[in-house]
Amino acid sequence: MRRPVSIAPPKGKLGVLTPGMGAVSTTLMAGVELVRQGHSVPVGSLTQMGTIRLGRRTEARVPKIKEFVKLAELKDLVFGGWDIYADSAYQAASKAGVLEAKDLSKAQKFLKGIKPMKAAFDQNYVKNLSGTNVKKGKNKFDLAEQIREDIRSFKKKNKLDRLVMVWCGSTEVFM
């Protein structure tokens, strides 16, 4: 039988790294920033607006998940990531065209400050994309070590206490 996992309470800054900084990740980044600025509400966010039922339905105990589970505050999130294109998060979001111009302009300064790190990329896995912001290495292990160093550097540079990674990259080949 598994032992219960002890989860440390959230404290300090949380780094959110995204492999891929295209439409999905830049929409996440812009959305968080718009909520932080008070220009939006986190519609669709399980952690911010979702609820959990406690006890029986008749007890009407339905707190928001963020009130029931200790989670990082949106103000403590720091974004970064990798992409095969060197475009800032603002440029990528503009090209993706999934955000309305009025919303994108409110998050422009924030998104312009997020520049992607060089990505580990193999054309064999993604046939329809090619970019210039790509790591060079002898083999995949070497590329993995470079990514590990990126993570350590990002954590140190931003004075982060912990990190998570959210996959937002394009994948086209099933192997």
Image (tube, rainbow, N blue to C red):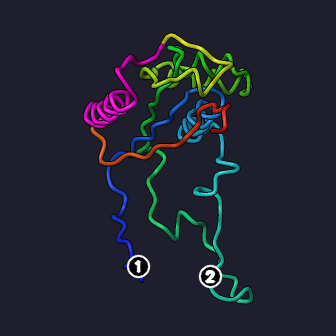
Residue drawn 56% across and 34% down? 29
Q: Do the residues labelled 2 and 1 touch (CB within 8 Å)?
A: no
* Magenta residues, start to end: 133-158
Q: Nearer the viewer, residue 104 or 123?
A: 123
| Mark 2 or 1: the one toward you | 1
Which residue is identified by label 2?
Answer: 54
Residue 73 vs 85, above or below: the answer is: below
Residue drawn at x 60%, y 28% as measured from the top left: 125
Q: Which of 92 and 54 is in front in this view?
A: 92
- The reply to whether the magenta stretch includes residue 108 is no
Query: In the drawing, what numbered circle is on residue 2?
Result: 1
Dot label at residue 150: none
Q: Position of residue 71 (x, y in %)?
A: 46, 59
Q: Badge 2 local density, few (<14 within 10 Å), some, or many (20+)?
A: few
Tell me the crowding category of disc 1: few under 14, some 14 to 19, or many 20 or more residues within 10 angstroms, Cα based.
Answer: few
Query: In the rendered image, which quarter contains the N terminus?
Result: bottom left
Q: Residue at x 52, y 23 (%)?
A: 122
Residue visible at 63% across and 36% down in the picture: 39
Q: Is 155 on the left-hand or right-hand side of 102?
A: left
Res 32 quadrant in image = top right
The x, y position of residue 134, in whole percent, is 46, 17
Amino acid type at image mark 1: Arg
Residue nearest the viewer, comparing 41 with 8: 8
The three-letter code of the residue at mark 2 reads Leu
Q: In which quarter of the image is residue 28?
A: top right
Q: Where is residue 163 in the image (x, y as percent from the top left)?
A: 38, 45
Secondary structure found at label 1: loop
* Prevalent SS, magenta region: helix
Q: What element carries label 2?
A: loop
Q: Does the magenta stretch include residue 150?
A: yes
> Where is 4 relative to 94, above or below?
below
